[in-house]
Image (tube, helix red, strand yellow):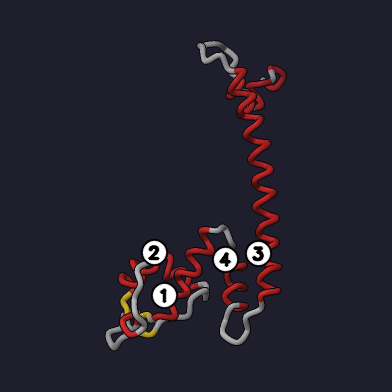
Amino acid sequence: MRAITASRAEHLPIGKISRLSGVNIETIRYYERIKMLPMPQRTASGRRVYGATELRMLAFIRRSRELGFSLNEIRALLRLGAPGTASCSEVKVIAAHHLEDIRAKLSDLRKLERLLAKTVARCSGKKVPNCPVLDILDVRRASPLHL
């Protein structure tokens, strides 16, 4: 995200805030609909305009999504990080839970990798009626009893 001064970050149209935050325009509108982002001010002609606060929130949400936090977790983190209400202990609980989820997914991915590596190693690569890779993907194919 390019640095922008607070005075220049007021009354930004949605396209500009999208470019500065790295968040797609439709995603910004979605965040407004689900109340993740406050409804923006409108110009006399009805166009959305945003400020430095919304820019910071969008950058926070985008980075949180990149790290795999769910929308509910991000909502809680935004609430906990608000001025005067920051609570590192509560943030730590959310982050620790998310870390547990990531570690479980990594464990599952390692198991999946071992299974697929073994299966690929058994595959001759030649034109044969049986293919170990297709067999693990299609259980009916692996067992003639299901035909």
* Residue at 58 percent of width and 69 percent of height: 74
Disc 1, SS: helix
Amino acid tagged 2: Gly
- The residue that mark 3 highlights is 95
Disc 3, SS: helix
Disc 2/disc 4 C-alpha distance (Å)? 17 Å
Q: Earlier in the sequence, mark 2 or mark 3?
A: 2
- The residue that mark 1 highlights is 55
- The residue that mark 2 highlights is 22
Question: Can you tell which of label 1 and label 4 is closer to the viewer?
Answer: 1
Question: Can you tell which of label 4 and label 3 is closer to the viewer?
Answer: 3
Q: Earlier in the sequence, mark 3 or mark 1?
A: 1
* Residue at 54 percent of width and 64 percent of height: 64
Left-right relation of 120 to 17: right
- The residue that mark 4 highlights is 71
For disc 1, the neighbor class at 10 Å (few under 14, some 14 to 19, many from 20) is many
Question: Can you tell which of label 2 and label 3 is closer to the viewer?
Answer: 3
Disc 2, SS: loop
User: Which of 130/73 is in front?
Assistant: 73
Residue 71: x %, y % from top left: 57, 66
For disc 4, the neighbor class at 10 Å (few under 14, some 14 to 19, many from 20) is some
Contact? badges 1 and 4 (CB < 8 Å): no
Q: Earlier in the sequence, mark 1 or mark 2?
A: 2
* Residue at 57 percent of width and 75 percent of height: 78
For residue 52, above or below residue 109: below
